[in-house]
């Protein structure tokens, strides 16, 4: 999820409220407003007396020439940098995004937001929004927060289904209501993740739980925002989790709780483009993988030769981050 900071040149309860309600990550304010903002809600303040201090925790820089670009590149090695361009030029932005680091760009319109968040496909870390009214601020914040990662999904053919006995599995309950075709990417190997659907389907055994994904065994990898993975057993209340739709759209949700229980498990193995992967799931009718058209495929009816959606990750992982090294999982 991209960061959205809001710049306030003077005190306005309405503007601060809009920032809080629309999920802004920080507000940049003049000195003396830190306590007033904290009285309205929990949000990071950027000010001489705030949570983040300009010149120490974050740098505000103009980007007008190659010399500015070189200076900003050095600062990105030390802290977050917010840049303001008098005339919008994409190439300098591309150069700085390629460098890496926490880079934010000052924006004043939807068009500028779209450019900043689309640079080199990856986009900048976030934007600093200047708005003329609470209504405009809500519109611009909504635009930033609607930008999500795209997830490439591919068809995989089921090769084997085996009952493997009892094990610890994790139900991930989120603070988001999911729809048909949505769920989480889970697997035994970080490079081969299955789209396990939320419990949105009506069935004769239990009421739908559209906020829940019965995700798999405790050791499994699960995709989280930012292109990372975590182990299912690590998830706790308040952690971010990536919700993925069969069409490849994603959204960030918050874990409400992660519930571990001992249940009978199935080992499901599949092949995608000559690569084999697997996942351990609870042996129950309500646990469903995802067909190529987004349809739910219950593991109780799953058969060899069926096709399900998976995500292939070509690189290895180190503490959840992609790394370019040789690794073999089996």
Image (spheres, rainbow, N blue to C red):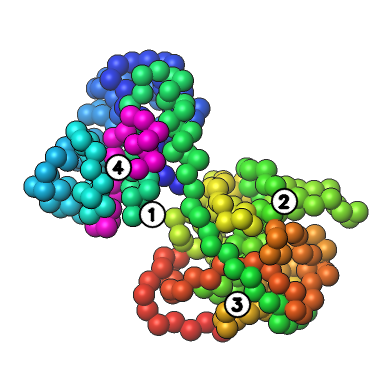
Q: Are marks 2 and 3 in contact (CB under 8 Å)?
A: no
Residue at the disc numbered 1: 121
Residue 180: numbered disc = 2
Kindly give the residue lying farthest to the left in the view shown.
Answer: 67
x and y percentages locating residue 225 in the rendered image: 48, 54
Image: magenta residue range: 97-115
Instruction: Residue at 41%, 44% (x, y): give it.
Output: 2
Q: Residues within 10 Å of mark 2 (few under 14, many from 20)?
A: some
Q: Are marks 3 and 1 in contact (CB under 8 Å)?
A: no
Q: State the residue in front, 307 or 100.
A: 307
Nearest to N terminus: mark 4 or mark 2: 4
Nearest to N terminus: mark 2 or mark 1: 1
- Disc 4 vs disc 3: which is toward the camera? 3
Instruction: Residue at 82%, 69% (x, y): give it.
Output: 300
Toward which corner of the image does residue 116 lie, by quadrant? top left
Toward which corner of the image does residue 302 lie, by quadrant? bottom right
């Amino acid at each position: 999820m991209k960061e959205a900071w809001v710049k306030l040149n003077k005190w306005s309860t309405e503007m601060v409220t809009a920032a809080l309600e629309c999920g802004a990550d920080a507000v940049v304010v003049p000195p003396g407003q830190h306590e007033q903002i904290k009285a309205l809600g929990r949000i990071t303040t950027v000010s001489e007396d705030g949570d983040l201090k300009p010149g120490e925790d974050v740098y505000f820089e103009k980007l007008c020439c190659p010399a500015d670009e070189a200076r900003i590149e050095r600062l990105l090695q030390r802290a977050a940098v917010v840049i303001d361009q008098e005339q919008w030029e994409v190439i300098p932005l591309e150069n700085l995004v390629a460098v890496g680091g926490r880079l934010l760009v000052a924006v004043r319109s939807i068009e500028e937001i779209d450019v900043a968040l689309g640079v080199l496909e990856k986009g900048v870390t976030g934007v600093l929004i200047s708005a003329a009214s609470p209504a405009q601020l809500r519109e611009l914040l909504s635009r930033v927060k609607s930008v999500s990662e795209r997830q490439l999904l591919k068809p995989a053919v089921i090769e084997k289904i085996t009952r493997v006995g009892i094990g610890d599995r994790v139900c991930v309950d989120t603070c988001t209501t999911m729809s048909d075709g949505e769920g989480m990417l889970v697997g035994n190997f970080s490079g081969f993740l299955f789209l396990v659907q939320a419990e949105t389907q009506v069935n004769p055994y239990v009421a739908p739980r559209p906020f829940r994904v019965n995700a798999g065994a405790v050791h499994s990898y699960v995709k989280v925002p930012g292109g990372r993975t975590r182990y299912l057993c690590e998830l706790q209340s308040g952690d971010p989790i990536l919700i993925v739709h069969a069409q490849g759209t994603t959204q960030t949700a918050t874990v409400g709780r992660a519930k571990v229980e001992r249940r009978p498990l199935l080992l499901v193995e599949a092949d995608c483009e000559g690569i084999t992967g697997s996942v351990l799931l609870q042996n129950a009718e309500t646990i469903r993988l995802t067909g190529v058209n987004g349809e739910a495929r219950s593991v109780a009816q799953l058969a060899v030769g069926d096709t399900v959606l998976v995500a292939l990750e070509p690189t290895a992982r180190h503490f959840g981050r992609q790394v370019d090294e040789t690794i073999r999982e089996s």
